[in-house]
Image: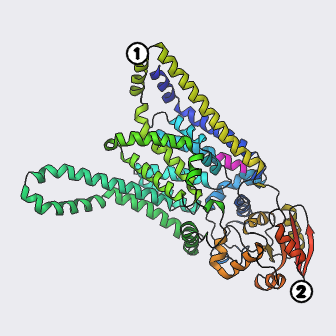
Amino acid sequence: MIHKIENFFEESHYIWYFFIFILAFFVFGFLQSAPRFMDPDSFYHAKMAVLLRDQGVVTNFPWLPWTVLNDYYIDQHFLYHVFLLPFVTVLNPLVGIKLATAVFAALFLVTFYWFLKKNQVNWALIFTLFLFLTKPLVFRINLAKVPALSLIFLLIGFYFIVHKRYWFLFLFSFFYVYLYGGWPLILVVLFFYLLVSVVADYLAGRQEHRRQLDSHYYLLMIKKPLFDFYLLLSVIFNRAYLKLVGSCLSGLAVGLIFNPYFPKNFRFYWYQLVQIGVINFRDKVRVGMEWLPYSFQSLLLDNCLLLILLLVAMALFVINIKKQSRLVWVSFLLSLFFLIITFKSQRYIEYFIPFAVIYCALVVSPYLSSHRLRQYSNWWQNLGAKKTALAVSLGIFWFMAIVMLASKDLGNVWYLYQNSGIPLRTMEQSSQWLANNVSPGEIIFHSDWDEFPLLFYYNSNNNYIAGLDPTFMYSADPKLYKLFEAITVGNLKTGLATIIQNDFKASYVLVNKTDHQSLKMTFESANHFEPMYEDDEAKIYQISL
């Protein structure tokens, strides 16, 4: 029976690609049907795809003159915006990006299954479907942003590295630069693969020559250190490893240099990767939630099934530690790396979960072979009918428990999308009023940095104060950012009209009434602020000095 089931899965595994895509597309399409975005950046991406469609490559970004983007803007998601083009062209851009998100998330699940199959993982379908039980991953790849595509590229790059597909790795590295500013992640994958490979080759080389050295005691004392040094150098400068490094680095270099944003892209990556990604001035600026640490308690509560699977895999890993393959070790180190940086910034949970499941799948897979399963089956049959019935009952119980947990997690994500987040038409009317009544190019002072993507989407005629990340403004002018923050959080309440007009060069002020009622009251009581427009979401003032 076990053999027949395994043959069915093996002979029809191409059908499972279609099954996974349809199932994932249905799930993520259902979640995307909520008329909201969970991240304001989704409005920015939709707008950039529209500008790319209508104007071509956007090389200048005048919409945020008080940030470093005014001088060093690059479209770090260029290829993602290219992929969005057919969706925002055929459909309303906000609807199109939702459909694209469901498609990309489904393609990620298909790619994950493909990666497991290519590495001979038994019951790869089960491990792929297990991803639906990880609420943080489902939430993150369902955001109308780049995470799903980034994971697709990273898994494909991982495959090219492990299987030494040099030319494909070069092309992949080139296109990864164009896809997403997180392209250095492929260097992380390459580093851990080379680390494991060099250590493994070095230990194997020492074992191979140990007998020769041990047979000559005087050589052991004199030549062994020299041999170890020579062996280490020969392993490090292995031709295959050098070709991997060359393929990856040359692809990245070509992507960075032959680039419409060269050379200012290097300065941009300093701000994006180092100042925002590594240093992360969250003690000085009000960064987005995704840059805040992931608490250990939240990690346990949000990923309980994954942690159980990890405990099982770790036990099997330790029991057979000397027999583990290089791929297992690499996936283990990658999982550990992404776990560590997840505790620094919770956005990296989207990388930790897939690589942790890959690690578990590789470790557990040998115990799910047809030979092992037949042994388990024969063992249960020898225990008698009652024990077999008990096994069936336990199987049904766990199946129902997993289905219920998956439904609960997906239900929680659905609830978030239905009852929180940003409605698609937020700020539309106030933005249209600005577009129709304020001269193009004028700067609008607004009540928070995360309002920019919505204002930008509905009105790109005017410019704004801060957006995309507050660090971009802080890096350009820390004093001006602190002044902006003091006004918007209500710490500064006097001389506002003069400050806003002279320091920020703005004559119009927009206040989000939902989140900034106290700021609205400040402007109501201040002098020289004339109300010009108001709706349920926002109020606009004109400064008259």
309 versus 468 height, above or below: above
Find disc 2 in the rendering and name its residue: 545
Answer whether labels 1 and 2 touch (C-beta < 8 Å): no
Q: Nearer the viewer, residue 517 or 347?
A: 517
Q: Residues within 10 Å of mark 1 (few under 14, many from 20)?
A: few
The quarter of the picture where residue 395 lies is top right
Percent coordinates x, y for residue 82 in the rendering: 65, 58
Q: Nearer the viewer, residue 367 or 456?
A: 367
Q: Which residues are magenta?
A: 98-103
507 versus 311 height, above or below: below
Percent coordinates x, y for residue 344 in the rendering: 54, 61
- The question of residue 101 being in magenta is answered with yes
Horizontal side of 148 relative to 448 (left or right) equals left
What amino acid is found at the position of numbered circle 2 in the picture? Leu
Horizontal side of 466 relative to 235 (left or right) equals right
Among numbered discs 1 and 2, the one appearing first in the sequence: 1
- State the SS at label 2: loop
Find disc 1 in the rendering and name its residue: 382
**Farthest residue in the top direction?**
385
- State the SS at label 1: helix
Cα distance between the residues tagged 1 and 2 = 92 Å
State the predominant SS element of the stretch in magenta: helix
Residue for point 63% across, 48% down: 104
Q: Is residue 237 visible?
A: no
- The question of residue 110 being in magenta is answered with no
Tell me the tag on residue 341: none
Q: Residues within 10 Å of mark 2 (few under 14, many from 20)?
A: few
Can you say which quadrant of the picture contains the C terminus?
bottom right
Q: Nearer the viewer, residue 208 or 441?
A: 208
Percent coordinates x, y for residue 301 in the rendering: 59, 46
256 versus 346 height, above or below: below
What amino acid is found at the position of numbered circle 1 in the picture? Asn
